[in-house]
Image (tube, coloured by chain):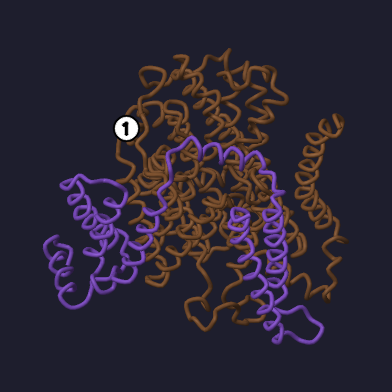
Chain colours: A purple, B brown
Amino acid sequence: MMARLLAAAPFMALSAAALVLLALARGFDAAAAAGRIGPGAWPGMVAGLLALVAAGKALVLMRGCDAPDSADQLGALEDQVAAPLQPGRAIVALALFAGYCLTLEMLGFPLATALLLGGFLLVAGYHRPLPLLATALGGSVALFLVFRSLVYVSLPLGKGPFLALSLGLLQLLGAA
Amino acid sequence: MLDQLALGLGQIATLTNLAILGLGLLVGMLVAILPGLTLVMGVALALPFTYTMGMIPSVILLTAIYVSGTYGGAFTSILFRVPGEPFDIPLLWDGHAMARAGRAAEALGLVLLAALFGGFLSLLFMVAVAEPFARVAVRLSTAEYFALILFGIASVVSLGGGSLVNALISLCVGLLIASVGVDQTYGVDRYSFGLRTLSDGIEYVAVMIGAYGLGEVLTRLEGGMRAEDQSAAGGPIRTVLPTLADALRLRWALLRSTAIGILVGIVPGAGATVASFVAYGAEGQYGARRTKLGSGIAEGVVAPQAASTASVGGAMTSLLTLGIPGSGTTAIMYGAFLLHGVQPGPQLFVATPEIPYTIFATMLVSLIGMCLIGYLFIRILVRVLEAPEALVAAFVVAFCFVGTLAVRNSVNDLWVIVAFGLVGWLFERHRLPLAPMVLGVILGPMAEGYFMTTMISANNDWTVFLTRPVSGVLVVASVLAMAVPIIRDQLRRRAHAAPVVAQI
């Protein structure tokens, strides 16, 4: 029973969210002239369809009637044969990505990207220190040069001491 | 027409554009060879580089990546049993079987033949059909365009494989994402919840980079980024071209698969993966040696490869003549067009004919170039597989972030790709297909625009979609496309249940 509930829960949540979006869509139609289709019609139809389909899926899963189709069966078989999954790594990586977004403007592109590359390699299980360091630093500098000097993308240089670091790097590379 | 094609060839024939074309061929092949990098991801990551280029170099780069990307993944499927792209999966069944039997060189030669044959025929189709098709397309109304997109969406949902319900859920999520922001008809702010970032809408390139780029990386990270045994089956790595007699013996398989590839490619949203599987399935139904399919026969190699390369022509025809992307990759190219202020569609052949004919010319040169590169440098190309997967993935992540920054220079967009990376990962965990969601994001605004315009013009009379002949046929076809798999599934379940009832 618990297993069925867990399986159905994401679809129940999706259906509920779709119903909220449907309710919100009704409010958009105030902008339309009387008797004319409004801006809430299209998202309302889609949200309504999603609520229905997701609720149906949740119901089927709750009743345990969902016979997996061949693609799901194949996927389940592949999961059995493959090594156990490690969702923790993905979650840590997501936290790393979020940290990158938070610190990019403060640290500047070169430093933030070096930390991103090095941190990701660690999370991915690449534990050779010297190649890791070389990749993180070298990769960051290479990306900085290529995107700034060849593709002309304006990359954040950082604030305070980190700005000085980025500018110093640019001078060193002759790209200032 | 030929003089226009010569004009296109003239556009390519500068040192810079030739270098860009060569770079595109290499990038396409490398992206296709490396597992964990998909062709769509490769084109999406290349898109930011085109921002500082002109329109012509941009289409040359992206077209070259697209064409060569349909060929490169075959190497790893045949030699290492690792599909470089989803559309290379059918090559595992016969191609790798041939490699295990010591016939890898022969399999690689067949793939080269199939890619050339499928590519050239689809190019001929494009050149012959595109302009007349565009003249017809100009006469289509918004109702027909909406019905066409509906048909494309229905085809993707029903042909994509896996659960129809899951595909429908994924599609609806994509369509809702596309609804965020200011609507194009009334200018009303929808689902922005007071956030300025959301008022601008959710950039679909960020969705693609997040879902296909970061999402794929997270999925592979969860699986541990295992380094599998990379020893090639079939002995020394080289290509042996088939003889003329062998090629003639395979002519029906090649023609059938190429036709399937072109037709499937035209259907908005279908693309190379669907083409490859359908062609393999058709070979299993109608091929002369269908009973031996899967055991390592030539037809099992040429069918999926010819179809996947031929689908490029079909998808491009749909993009250039109707302005509707025929695949995920052409959806990125659609973005490249808009970026340079060019609206793909029937007017393209009138206003800027040099663009579509440059694309045709690029395809022609790319087909020859990719086969030469594959034939001469295959041993060097497959060495990229020796790079640790974690290293490749780290740079993919970095490219995702930098590429997104290049779009609008906005850190807020980085949050969008992280969010969609999470969505992509969660979708994968719950076996929700990603392609319908992404296509919903891309085609949603177009579909809504055509729908709203039609309804307003027809005074809210929805039957207009059924009473107009072309639109009516397409709507009925869409309903059938969705209904047939459901009915077939129900009949199959009853057939399995029947013996139990009989016993009782």
Q: Quadrant of residue A176?
A: bottom left
Q: Is residue B350 visible?
A: no
Q: Is residue B49 visible?
A: yes
Residue farthest along the top direction in this orientation: B245
Looking at the rendered structure, the number of numbered marks drawn on it comes to 1
Residue drawn at (67%, 36%) of the image: B260
- Label 1: how many Cα within 10 Å (few below 14, some 14–19, many 20+): few
- Which chain is home to disc 1? B
Q: Quadrant of residue B51?
A: bottom left
Above-or-below relation of A48 to B242: below
Q: In this view of the protein, which residue sits in the foreground, B49 or A56?
A: A56
Q: Which residue is mark 1?
A: B383
The location of residue A152, given as percent across then percent down, is: 31, 64
B465 sits left or right of B88 in the view: right
The location of residue B470, given as percent across then percent down, is: 82, 55
On the rendered image, what quadrant is the C terminus of chain B found in?
top right
Q: Amino acid at mark 1?
A: Arg
The location of residue B373, given as percent across then percent down, is: 39, 32
Residue drawn at (42%, 59%) of the image: B54
Q: Quadrant of residue B45?
A: bottom left
Q: In this view of the protein, which residue sits in the foreground, A18 or B54?
A: A18
